[in-house]
Image: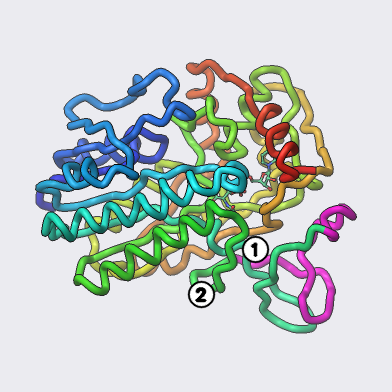
Amino acid sequence: MNKKRVLVTGGAGFVGSHLVDALLHQGHTVRVYDNLTPQVHSDGLPGYFAQGVEFVEGDMRNPERVREAVRNIDVVFHLAAAVGVGQSMYEISHYMGANTQGTANLLQALLDTRCRVEKLIVASSMSIYGEGKYVCEACGEMAPPPRPLSQLKQKSWEALCPLCGSALKPVPTDESKPLQCTSIYALSKKDQEEMTLLFGRTYEVPVVALRYFNIYGSRQALSNPYTGVAAIFASRLINGNPPLVFEDGQQRRDFVSVQDVVAANLLAMERPQADGMALNIGSGQPITIQGVAEELAKALGTEVPAQITGKYRAGDIRHCFADISAAEKVLGYRPKVRFGEGIQELVQWLGSQKAVDRSAEAVERLTLYGLAA
Ligand code: UD1
């Protein structure tokens, strides 16, 4: 492939920085645009940030600065975003500003500067599905609405068939599942995805939206208590504390290694087949949250058992795991990292870090807003 001039927004972050390394490895020229948000980067530019990258410090909410960042660029990976489902429920205007308005600023900048990019790849999220896809034995395929608060208060966790009320069986979620956002974060991700795809159709710019499932791996920000559950549990175990498991721990997710996510991004850049599409990027392998806690304890060699709290978080879904057949077909995407191996990378990284455990603080904050009970 020809060498490109690539812009990675959010390139100092967890996924972005791994992508930057892979792009440099392929010989591309990379510019990173990142605001080094203190919640993630309490010590400024992270130690892992690659040499030989042009770094532009700036916020997606600053249109002038974004205009400078897109100058003379061939390919854009848009990864900059505020990421925290729980936090988004009480910092509504911050999330919509950084994610929705931030993406609007990027597209406006591309238009205003007549920057005709060859490809724009946007980080979307499984959160936009809300509940995953289910099957009711009596009624067939279902896309159930969020579980009502009254049900969660009774600690009845499984999603129920909206037609006959019986318990539903979760099945892999494909891209045709109706989108039913259950958090402000999800809504802002849906905006990002739809806005970029619409822009691509209108101005004939090849755009690909990648709907990530639960990404884990090295460089996941431990200082951020709203980071994914794998890093939160690992920090607690390292500090000798039991992972605090919401509901009954039997909720299922799809954990995908950051290495596989990077591979998907490179494929989306190189191949035209996915242009104009939104694709699931997961491992295709479901795992329960209790299973995650157990695998992590095993990898860390600790006996501390998880604490099943029976609490719930507002906006949480019960099950969602990916059907990745579309990405396999159009991109040739094949996840390579199994969870058991991938967490070794996470655990090694955690060993080199100050594993500050701020998860109790985060739960307290959510409780204060009535978002966890
Ligand atoms: C959400 C988003 C996803 C985003 C991810 C990380 C949805 C549907 N998905 O995923 O797009 O990438 O956050 O920001 O909104 N849990 C515990 N104990 C904890 C923390 C979490 O038991 O201390 C449980 C949660 O209740 C949930 C599961 O672990 O059932 C996964 O939580 P989390 O890692 O926050 O990710 P999701 O909510 O799946």
* Side of 189 where 87 appears, left or right: right
Residue 130: horizontal and vertical position, in percent? 61, 62
Q: Are marks 2 and 1 in contact (CB under 8 Å)?
A: no
Q: Which residue is mark 2?
A: 176
Residue 131 circle label: 1
Residue 281 visible? The answer is no
Q: Main secondary structure of the magenta part?
A: loop
Residue 330: horizontal and vertical position, in percent? 34, 68
In the figure, residue 157 lies in which quadrant?
bottom right
Q: In the rendered structure, does residue 46 fall within the stretch colored magenta?
A: no
Which amino acid is tagged 1? Glu
Q: Is residue 12 above or below residue 209?
A: above
For the magenta stretch, what is the residue range?
A: 150-172
Label 2 packing within 10 angstroms: few (<14), some (14-19), many (20+): few
Residue 240 circle label: none
Residue 111 visible? The answer is yes
Please tell me which residue is depicted at 19% across the width and 38% down the height of the picture: 30
Which amino acid is tagged 2? Ser
Label 1 packing within 10 angstroms: few (<14), some (14-19), many (20+): many
Residue 238: horizontal and vertical position, in percent? 64, 20
